[in-house]
Amino acid sequence: MSPPSKPTKKTAKKKAAKKKVTKKSVTKKASKKKTVRRKAAKKASKRAKKPAKRSLLRRLLPFVGFLVTICLVAAVMFTAYLDHTIRQQFEGKRWSLPARVYAQPLELYQGKPLSFPSLYKELEVAGYRRTPRAQQPGTYKHTGQHIRISTRDFQYWDGFVAGTTYDIKVDTGLVQSIHSEGQELAVMRIDPAQVAAIYPQHQEDRDLLAYADIRESLLKALLLIEDQKFYQHHGVRPLAIARALLVNLQAGRAVQGGSTLTQQLVKNYFLTHERSLSRKLQEAWMSVLLELHYEKNDILEAYVNEVFLGQDGDRAIHGFGLAARYYFDKPLADTSIEQQALLVAMVKGATFYNPRRHPVRAKKRRDLVLDQLLKFQVIDTETALHAKRQPLGVVTKPKSYRNRYLAFTQLVQRQLQRDYQESDLRTEGLRIFTTLVPSSQHWLEQSISSHIKHLEQRADVPKYSLQTAAIVSDSRSGEVLALAGARDPRDSGFNRALDIKRQIGSLVKPAVYLTALQQGYTAASVLDDTRFDHVGERMNVWSPQNYSAKEYGDVLLYQALINSYNISTARLGLELSVAKVSRSLRNLGLAGQWSDYPSILLGALESSPYDVAQMYQTLAGQGFYTPLRAVREVVTAGGSRLQRYPLELEQRIASREAYLINSLLQKVAVQGTAKRLASSLPGLQAAGKTGTTNDGRDTWFAGFTGEHLAVVWLGQDNNQPTSLTGSSGALPIWEGLFKNLPSRPYQATQPQDIVWAWVNESGELSASKCQNTVQLPFIKGTEPAKLAACSDKGFFDTLFNW
């Protein structure tokens, strides 16, 4: 083998170059491998990250599912809540209904005192209209001594009475006869007026209507205007909502609504008037639920009673029933087709289409409703044209019960609160039949308004500073017939008849003299009317004086009472004892707290006109205590009687002493401080007593006839003096009342052991022919025994036994 040849220089260069190239390639390959490895690592990293992401989703999926489940459960629970709310309210008491307060129904019978002006006022307040024939219910006509009255159907506390036509003859102030359908009747009754309402806190009001009582023409008009597909949809109409939304978007304002009647009912009945998507969705869902549970007619009946149709001050008018009375002064059943069309027209906007404020706008909308009725052949062309020619027919002054007889209504509420919770009175729809006689209330208010300004001038006090309060009751039953709490009957503030506490002055004196008669004194007993000083337990001195500042010496008991002498009354009361007089006051029924100081003998104790009336009610009742009452019956909305307030009697004064004191009180109105009544009202033979406190701060008169008792107070709220007395202040209002109020004369039944005897000024037995004598009543055996000599009267007096 030959040895390797020695490489040449050129070959060595080639080898070195090759080696260099090889080295470079290796480096390049290594770099490439690194890149490949880097990319592979990157891919591996990406591959590694992907499984991690999928793992997070797998972890989140249960949580998402839990949230979805929670939302579904919440939705189900919310639906259940809405469903419960709907069923509870719709099936239970759907509305908070005010208590309806009614006046006393006018009862007529043969022999009842009645004047045509009083009868007119009763009929006017009850909503009766004078017509030529009186053929329709709620109308009357008057011809000479005869009056025809067509009464309305009415659900009384003792049953339903259908409307009837009566012919009544009235002559010499008395009902002579009553006929109906050719038969003579002993008694009749006229449906009473609603005079007030005790409203719920939200001040809503409505007259509920059953579906069967709703006029078919009104229902058709309502559906044609508001929801023509009412009987086809299931609470909502999605296409109608979408169409309305598109129209509103194009117009840039709300010009069309897509709500069904069911949705409108839900919105008004269950929801607020908030405008939001969530409330709209809730409304739609509740509408579906409502339709699932109830018949279409039930929903329609609820709508007719719920829809808002006006505002009467702060009282909201809801439902077509009340709206018919508010706008047309008639029940819905008596409305014409054009009147029904107007009510339906107002559904779109009761304020915007208010016929009193916007008659042109309201008529245009009404005629549109009539056009729809014609288009769908509910009415014919002739009817439509005739209806469109008619005026709106809205009464000028809406009948509102909120501003009528406020003082009397306060008394009713107070008496009811003894037996009922306030919430029941405002929400249960109770029907309260009261003792109020609208004509008596009218005459009382008229007398106050006609006298107060003149009395204010006589009293020499600033204008509008003189105030008054009065109460009128049935002297036999204790029923409160009228009440005035202020000079202005619309004054809803302080009720002076119930709440003012003022000294009663000489109104207390009948209790002093009654006590004396019970202790053996007689009307002819001689009393001392000379000044004296009474020293009390604390060494305080009481020195009573007469109003005239005079002394009258020896006076007879009856004279001291009818002339209201203070000195003789005080002496008598102290002899009897203040405690005994105080017991007599409480026995008569005077409520309140007072101490048995001697000053109470002259009326230095405070009381309200209502409490004074309770005291004199016992006197007018001839010794029988009868609690004053303003409520007769309470009936549920369904007609069931809840509670009666029957007549209560308790004899507290023996009949003979009651007869004696009342006979002397009759002399007050003939010879005493109220003698003006003998000439102005001679036929009434009234009995009563004036009362005046120091400086004329309070003036009173309490008097009664055979049928009525009335107590009047007059004074200033600030208790400042006036120049008036009981006879010049309160008495004229009492007198003005009885000049118009039909009433019977006071003729008490005389007990068998009562005799009348003539006595002279010294209290001795005398004869009618003698001068300065008076005839007085005595319990048999107590009359004077000594016969006094007398000088005859004048020739003519003796001749005619005057």
Image (cartoon, rainbow, N blue to C red):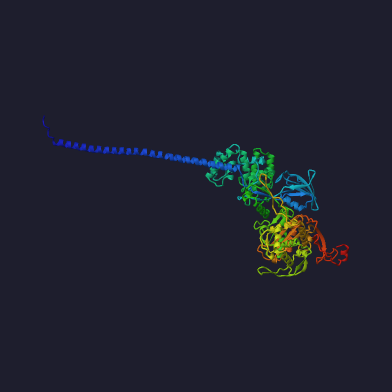
Residue 586, relative to residue 294: is it above or below?
A: below
* Towards the viewer: 385 or 351: 351
Location of the N terminus by quadrant is top left
- Name the image quarter holding residue 531: bottom right
- Name the image quarter holding residue 239: top right
Location of the C terminus by quadrant is bottom right
* Whole-percent x, y for residue 539 in the image: 66, 70
* Towards the viewer: 482 or 781: 781
* Towards the viewer: 794 or 103: 794
Instruction: Confirm whether residue 477 shows in the render.
Output: yes
Q: On the picture, is 445 further left or further right than 83?
A: right
* Whole-percent x, y for residue 759 in the image: 82, 64
Instruction: Confirm whether residue 454 shows in the render.
Output: no
The residue drawn where x is 15% and y is 36% is 12
* Whole-percent x, y for residue 192 in the image: 71, 49
* Towards the viewer: 184 or 544: 544
Residue 553, relative to residue 192: is it above or below?
A: below
**Residue that lies at the very extreme toward the left in this rendered image:** 2
Q: On the picture, is 29 further left or further right than 549?
A: left
Q: On the picture, is 448 further left or further right than 350?
A: right
**Residue that lies at the very extreme toward the top in this rendered image:** 1
The residue drawn where x is 38% and y is 38% is 55
Residue 15, relative to residue 514: is it above or below?
A: above
* Whole-percent x, y for residue 774 in the image: 81, 63
Number of marks: 0
